[in-house]
Image (cartoon, helix red, strand yellow):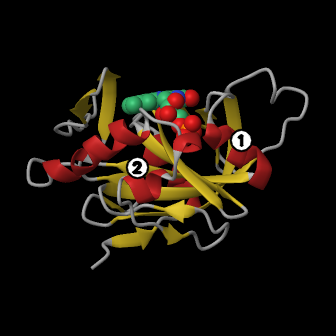
Amino acid sequence: MSHFQPVALEHASRLINHGPTVLVTSAAADRRNVMAAAWSMPVEFTPPRIAIVIDKHTWTRELMTASGAFAVCIPCVTGIDLAYAVGSVSGRDGDKFARFNIEAARGPVLGMPLIEEGCVAWMECRLVREPHTEDAYDTCFAEVVSAAADARVFHDGRWRFDDANTDLHTIHHLGGGNFVRSSSPIAARPL
Ligand SMILES: Cc1cc2nc3c(=O)[nH]c(=O)nc-3n(C[C@H](O)[C@H](O)[C@H](O)COP(=O)(O)O)c2cc1C
């Protein structure tokens, strides 16, 4: 049973606000791909836009440029091996979905591949075309057009990490396949 529920676009920025490692999925014609990305952030409120660094030499970048779309899927602790695996080989050398036995649904707005197993959220993104810079920079800007998250750990517009759901916490890459999970929440008190 899927625990994913739609996330209002006004709350989509919260999904990556804390800087988790993400999976970037892409598809164009009959080709599809997935890679890992540690570098992403919200940059605009309305419409919600994000910036994400996708090396211009990757297969992902080629597919994104061809289709004008991609998706960001946010892995949790149970998706660490997958995140490291898809970030360590190129889809040019073979379909990673088949190689790593990854199931993907089709995104509701852009039809991008969406991974829910080992992940706790996803966003479909429409690439903002920047013809004058796209050959020069690895940074890409995109508008979030649909989003969903696992309601066990994200509801009412924010993450709800606690000691009872540590397997569903998002992950942060320290390098070389080592990660830390988003840990215990600490609420600020009024001063
Ligand atoms: C944890 C992790 C984080 C990564 N972060 C980024 C990133 O932010 N940007 C990037 O361009 N590549 C990043 N990479 C590297 C890409 O995932 C890697 O080059 C991948 O093989 C590209 O796949 P592709 O050619 O199939 O698109 C990361 C790799 C790992 C393992």
Q: Is residue 23 left or right of residue 143?
A: left
The residue to which callout 2 is attached is: 74
Which residue is the extreme one toward the bottom? 1
Q: Is residue 135 left or right of residue 185?
A: right
- Quadrant where the image shows the C terminus: top left
Dividing the picture into quadrants, the one containing residue 108 is bottom right
In terms of secondary structure, where does tag 2 sit?
strand
Q: Nearer the viewer, residue 131 or 183?
A: 131
Please, what is the three-letter code of the amino acid marked with disc 1?
Glu
Q: Is mark 1 within 8 Å of ligand 1?
A: yes
Q: Residues within 10 Å of mark 2 (few under 14, many from 20)?
A: many
The residue to which callout 1 is attached is: 62
- What residue sits 67% from the left and 66% below the top? 110
In terms of secondary structure, where does tag 1 sit?
helix
- Residue 141 visible, this orientation: yes
Q: Is residue 169 above or below residue 141?
A: below
Query: Which-is-in-front pick, marks 2 and 1?
Result: 1
- What residue sits 31% from the left and 20% below the top? 176
Q: Where is residue 7 shown, x and y percent of the image?
A: 48, 65
